[in-house]
Amino acid sequence: SAVISQKPSRDICQRGTSLTIQCQVDSQVTMMFWYRQQPGQSLTLIATANQGSEATYESGFVIDKFPISRPNLTFSTLTVSNMSPEDSSIYLCSADVSGGAKEQYFGPGTRLTVT
Amino acid sequence: QQQVKQSPQSLIVQKGGISIINCAYENTAFDYFPWYQQFPGKGPALLIAIRPDVSEKKEGRFTISFNKSAKQFSLHIMDSQPGDSATYFCAAIIQGAQKLVFGQGTRLTINP
């Protein structure tokens, strides 16, 4: 298993600004994942982040809006850029300690409200 | 074909009863099926998982039943307790793929 922490746990931001969310894993992992979850809804994958390479984005998500860094095997950041109220959501990171994607452990999430 | 369809959307069960959540898929390339439990304000937690070469897997009060021919799998919670009240997500993944496909989620409420 893995213990994953996220910072901040929640934030209220003004439209047009950017927020960087940090994700820390207690062990080295190859792949980290970033998701968005609207309250009461399922999880939508934003991108997959491998250390040492560019993140792979899902359809509907672009690097200019959601830049991701992966500087080492235990840490990643997701930035939500030029925010609008539509970006209000819960952002989750996850990782699979087995090196794949099938047994993902999730962080507690970051609740973002954009006013 | 990449979808996993989950039902019901919400479920209310009396304490001590059996909770059953169902999922169906189309893509026969899926070869791993985990279930996640999510409490309000928390991230999803891996609960139990099954491979398609097994028809049933049990861990404590939680059992996954898998019907490969019907392309369906279900989560059974025996002796359901108020502490089981949470949202449950089924998921599926193709071996070697880098993406879990999640169901829509089931909000389970166990009445005391």
Image: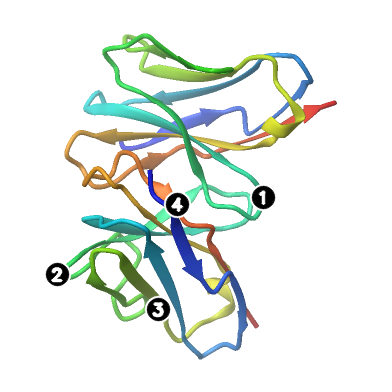
Lower position in the chain sequence, tag 2 or tag 3: 2
Give the Cα separation between the discs numbered 2 and 4.
Answer: 22 Å
Q: Position of residue A90 (x, y in %)?
A: 55, 63
The residue beneath circle 2 is A52
Q: Are marks 3 and 1 on the same chain?
A: no
Q: Secondary structure at mark 1?
A: loop
Lower position in the chain sequence, tag 2 or tag 4: 2
Can residue B36 be seen from the camera position used here?
A: yes
The residue beneath circle 4 is A106
Quick check: B48 above or below B101? above
- Nearest to viewer (mark 4 / mark 3): 4
Q: Position of residue A110 (x, y in %)?
A: 54, 67
Lower position in the chain sequence, tag 4 or tag 3: 3
The residue beneath circle 1 is B40
Can residue B64 be seen from the camera position used here?
A: no
- The chain identifier of the residue carrying mark 4 reads A
Q: Are marks 4 and 1 on the same chain?
A: no
> How many C-alpha atoms fall within 10 Å of the one at disc 3: few (<14), some, or many (≥20)?
some
Looking at the image, the residue that sits furthest to the front is A26
Q: Secondary structure at mark 4?
A: strand
> How many C-alpha atoms fall within 10 Å of the one at disc 2: few (<14), some, or many (≥20)?
few
Q: Residue at x 38, y 73 (%)?
A: A78
The residue beneath circle 3 is A79
